[in-house]
Image: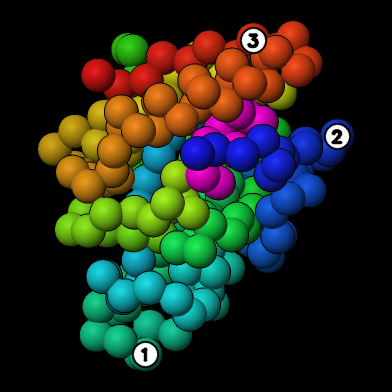
Amino acid sequence: MIQNDKLFRLDADGWYDNASRAPCTNFDPRPDGTVISLLVIHNISLPPGQFGGAYIEDLFANQLDCDAHPYFARLRDLKVSAHFLLRRDGSAMQFVATNKRAWHAGMSAFNGQQRCNDFSIGIELEGSDFEPFTDAQYQTLTQLTLALSTQLPLTDVAGHEHIAPGRKTDPGPFFDWQRYRRDYLALLEKSASDTKIRADLCFPN
C-alpha cells in the first residue's frame, strides 16, 4: 500500500528535497516557452543486468572508466543524463534540475511533437528488460510522479519505448504500467482529499 509519507518538494531552482543530488553537466536550457508536458520512464543498468555501484552516476558525470568492463567501450564519449535515477532500494538521485533539459530521450517523438528532451522529464529506474522492478521503486516512482504532476504542467506519461519505437525497448515488458497507474491514482485521491489538488495524467494503455 502506498504511504503518503515520502512526498517530494520542488524548490525554486527545480530541485527536489527528497532526492540526493549528483554532479552532472550533461544538460542545457529548454527552448524558450517550452511547456513541460511529458514524463518519460526508462531503465538502466551498468553493466547490463548488474545493479549497484557508481557506474550510472559516473556515466552521467562523464567519468565512466570505459576500461572497467568490456561493455563500456561502446559508451566512450557518450554524453547522456536523466533528471532522476531510482535505485533498486527506492532511493532517488537527481542529476538535472527540472527546469533544464536533460539528455535522456534522443531521437524521439510524442503525439507528433519531435525532440522529447525539450518538453519532458526523464526518470531512470535501475533495472533491465528482463526482470521485475522492486516494490520500493514503484513506491518512490509513484511519490515522485505525484510531486512532478502537481508542480509541473505534465499531461502524459510514456516509456522510452513509446517515444522511440524500434530504437528503444525500455522500461520493458517487466514494468507494470497498470500497477503504476493504479498506485498513482490511489495516492492522488488520498492527497487530493488532504490538499484539494488535481493532477490527472494520461498513462499508456
Residue hosting label 2: 12
Residue for badge 3: 198
| Residue depicted at x 53% and y 12% | 200
Report the Cα–Cα distance between label 2 and label 3.
21 Å
Q: Is residue 144 magenta?
A: yes
Query: Does 53 appear above or below 129?
Result: below
Amino acid residing under circle 2: Ala
Q: Is residue 121 visible?
A: no
In this rendering, which labeled residue sits more in front, label 1 or label 3?
Answer: 3
Provide the residue designation for mark 1.
Answer: 68
Give the quadrant of residue 162.
top left
Q: Nearer the viewer, mark 2 or mark 1?
A: 2
Other-residue count near label 3 (Cα within 10 Å), few / some / many at <14 / 14–19 / ≥20: some
In the rendering, at what x and y percent does residue 28 appear?
A: 63, 43
Residue range of the region highlighted in magenta in the rendering: 139-148
Left or right, residue 118 beside residue 172: right
